[in-house]
Amino acid sequence: MSLKNKKSAASVTPLSTRRRNHSVWLGPLIVFLGAVSYFIYFAQFPVLRDFPWINFPVLFLGCWVNLIAIKRAFGRSDHFRGKLMAALSMAFSILLTALFAGYIGYISYQLPAPTETTQGLSIAPEFVLSDQNGQEVGLSDFRGKKLIVTFYRGHW
Amino acid sequence: MDEIRALDSEVLAISIDAPEQSRKLAAKKRLSFSLLSDPEAQVIELFGLRHPGANPMGEADIARPATFILDREGHIVWKIIPDNWRIRIRPQTLIDQLGLIE
């Protein structure tokens, strides 16, 4: 054993007696839940869908918990274990938060500009399509009624 | 949906999904309006709404989101073409617009 190792071994509490650093796994868990809950739950509420008022604070909370994990692991390594795990979990949390923010603020805007065809339409072109029950439905079936025609991306 | 029908109006929703897929969606969400299947994106093309490259696995391009309001003669009197696929139009906005039409 080298001199350096002897020195640190003397000043540092043995690994087995150092406390577990729970914020190491709590941080990324909060971040993960903060991102996933948008898609599986919060997106059904229009106000929370348009802007993730709940998800962003949760993501930041997770990153903050992760920061505590880092501080403990590196600043008080005599008390807490897991430097590598703290660094990895911080990287995970930051990456996922950045991905989520990127999806909300950038990726979901990646739509083609409205075409001249769309802008130039004054009368809706006639069409006949099959509905969910296999019935043929044509636009002209609704002449005399007001109509909302909406195009959606679908499940494909 | 009842409010929309009370305004003598109907809803047609169009995507490239097969009728079978739409049937599941309508059952799950309890939708009472028509989900129309445009598997080759022909009507989507008619309205100029193809989103090229957004469906690399499938045969047809999916539609970019867009909503039109037609009067009783089929004139497009109002439309919205959002620039973000997350943000959906509020039903109340459509109801307000339908109320403005004779």
Image (spheres, coloured by chain):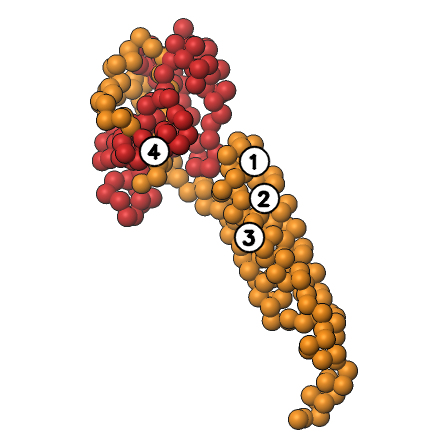
Chain colours: A orange, B red
Judged by depth in the image, the label closer to the viewer, 2 or 3, is: 3
Q: What amino acid does circle 2 point to? A: Asn
Q: Residue at x 24, y 19 (%)?
A: A138
Chain under callout 4? B
Q: Kindly indicate whether the residues beneath marks 3 and 4 are on one polypeptide chain.
A: no
Mark 2, other Cα within 10 Å: few <14 / some 14–19 / many ≥20: many
The answer to whether the residue labelled 1 contacts the one labelled 2, judged by CB atoms less than 8 Å apart, is yes
Residue A144, by quadrant, is top left
Q: State which tag comes first along the sequence, 2 or 3.
A: 3
Q: Secondary structure at mark 3?
A: helix
Query: Which class describes the residues within 10 Å of circle 4: few (<14), some (14-19), or many (20+)?
Result: few
Q: Which residue is mark 4?
A: B24
Q: Where residue A104 appears, x then y in whole percent?
A: 51, 43
- Residue farthest toward the right in the current orientation of the protein: A11
Locate residue B80 relative to residue B18 in the image: left or right. right
Residue under label 1, please give it. A48
Which numbered disc, 4 or 2, marks the residue closer to the eye? 4
At horizontal 63% and vertical 53% (from top left) the residue drawn is A62
* Residue drawn 67% across the image and 93% down it: A2
- Determine the secondary structure under disc 1: helix
Q: Are marks 4 and 1 in contact (CB under 8 Å)?
A: no
Q: From this view, report whether residue A137 is shown above or below residue A84.
A: above
- Residue A118: percent from the left, percent from the top? 33, 27
Q: Position of residue B55 (x, y in %)?
A: 31, 44
Amino acid type for the residue under numbered disc 4: Lys
